[in-house]
Image (spheres, rainbow, N blue to C red):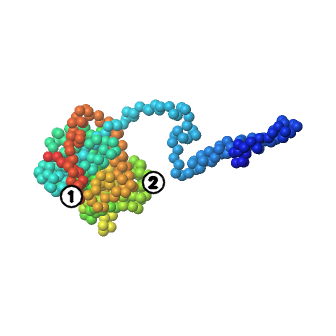
Amino acid sequence: MPSHFLTNSSSAIPSSSDLPDDPVSTATTSSSPDMWNYLWIPILISLSKDLSSARAASSPRSILLPSQSDSSSAASLSVPRCPAIDPKLNYQPVIGILSHPGDGASGRLNNATNASYIAASYVKFVESAGARVIPLIYNEPPEILFEKLNLVNGVLFTGGWAKSGLYFDTVRAIFEKALARNDAGYHFPLYAICLGFELLTMIISKDSNILEQFSATDQASTLQFMKNVNIEGTVFQRFPPDLLNKLSSECLVMQNHHYGISPGRLQETQALSSFFKILTTSADENNKVYVSTVQAYSYPVTAFQWHPEKNAFEWGLSMIPHSEEAIQVTQHVANFFVSEARKSLNRPPIRKVLDNLIYNYSPTYCGKAGKGYDEVYIFT
């Protein structure tokens, strides 16, 4: 900037004797440089702001809030009028989780012969997607068990080991009631995880020897999608494309089973191939391929040979994936299940629901052993 903008010296002020004969024209001429300097300052500031805005808009990391966009107006700053909730959806869904024989810790926590348990990871899995849980205690009197079944909007069968006796009979009875509800026009989703999938395979095929042996205990693995499979309407429909790709190339899911069914055997068994569509396969430690995810053709029934609940909520086994992508897998799988449960229009009495929620029980922490479950709910 010229020095005459900064000086206060009297020498810069001309005396009357120095004034020219035509003061008007001379003053205009002499002040022109000063005037232009003053005019350029706001122009340069304006250009600088425009350049900064352009850089921000073109930056890949810039995130403009609605109030920062050019399209914002006074109208958009007013309080929005939220639409009424969809009457076709249930925004307070409840999931029934079937308990499994034992205490989840080989009798170290409770060795009562009538004890049963639900791993807390299954409860958290459901709750994380916006639903509550009612425990369906497998060895309760049938009239009590099925009264509780009337309070829920979907059912989850957990992992475990029991494949016979009262537990098998209870799984079969609940499964048949779930199908009957759907056949009657009442949407009722069902998730079957690990043992749950194995039991459905046995029930649908009516063959207690249908399962094959695999070596997939404490193993992280990929999911290989069947060629040309259509995932619309399945648990994978809302997975972002990059996560679907990573499922096939990175070990983002947890396997922990000794039994399963091969794609060939499932497809050769007419009762199974007509009921289930194979979505994914996986391979065990010996590269033997087994079916890892299926979806029923005509019912909201999804079965997993892997454990979607473990990534976010279990820490006792060394090979459980805990990466950000693995946690997203858990969240997407839980969200799909609960989104299906919201389609259920079953609206039981509120007091009966509250009296039977799992909040009436306390979990037992058992994670210090370093293996198995971190927390379990035990029922006797």
Q: x, y (%) of residue 255?
A: 30, 59
Disc on res. 241: 2
Instruction: Determine whether label 2 and label 1 are within 8 Å by CB.
Output: no
**Disc nearer the start of the sequence (2/1):** 2
Q: Amino acid at mark 1?
A: Ala
Rendered view: 287 above or below 312: below
Is residue 295 at all visible to an observer of this figure? no
Q: Amino acid at mark 2?
A: Pro
C-alpha distance separating marks 2 and 1? 38 Å
At a point 84% along the width and 40% down the height, the residue shown is: 18
- Number of dots carrying numbers: 2
At a point 16% along the width and 39% down the height, the residue shown is: 143
Disc on res. 369: 1
Q: x, y (%) of residue 81?
A: 46, 31
Is residue 52 at all visible to an observer of this figure? yes
The image quadrant that residue 22 belongs to is top right
At a point 27% along the width and 49% down the height, the residue shown is: 122
Q: x, y (%) of residue 44?
A: 67, 45
Q: x, y (%) of residue 319?
A: 30, 61
Secondary structure at badge 2 equals helix
* Residue 2 vs residue 130, the one in the foreground: 2
Of tags 2 and 1, the one toward the viewer is 1
Answer few, some or many: residues within 10 Å of disc 2's Cα (few below 14, many 20 plus, some between 14 and 19): few
Secondary structure at badge 1 equals helix
* Residue 29 vs residue 132, the one in the foreground: 29
* Residue 193 vs residue 92, the one in the foreground: 92
Left or right of 126? Residue 172 is: left
Disc on res. 256: none
Answer few, some or many: residues within 10 Å of disc 1's Cα (few below 14, many 20 plus, some between 14 and 19): few
At a point 21% along the width and 47% down the height, the residue shown is: 363
Furthest residue to the bottom?
286
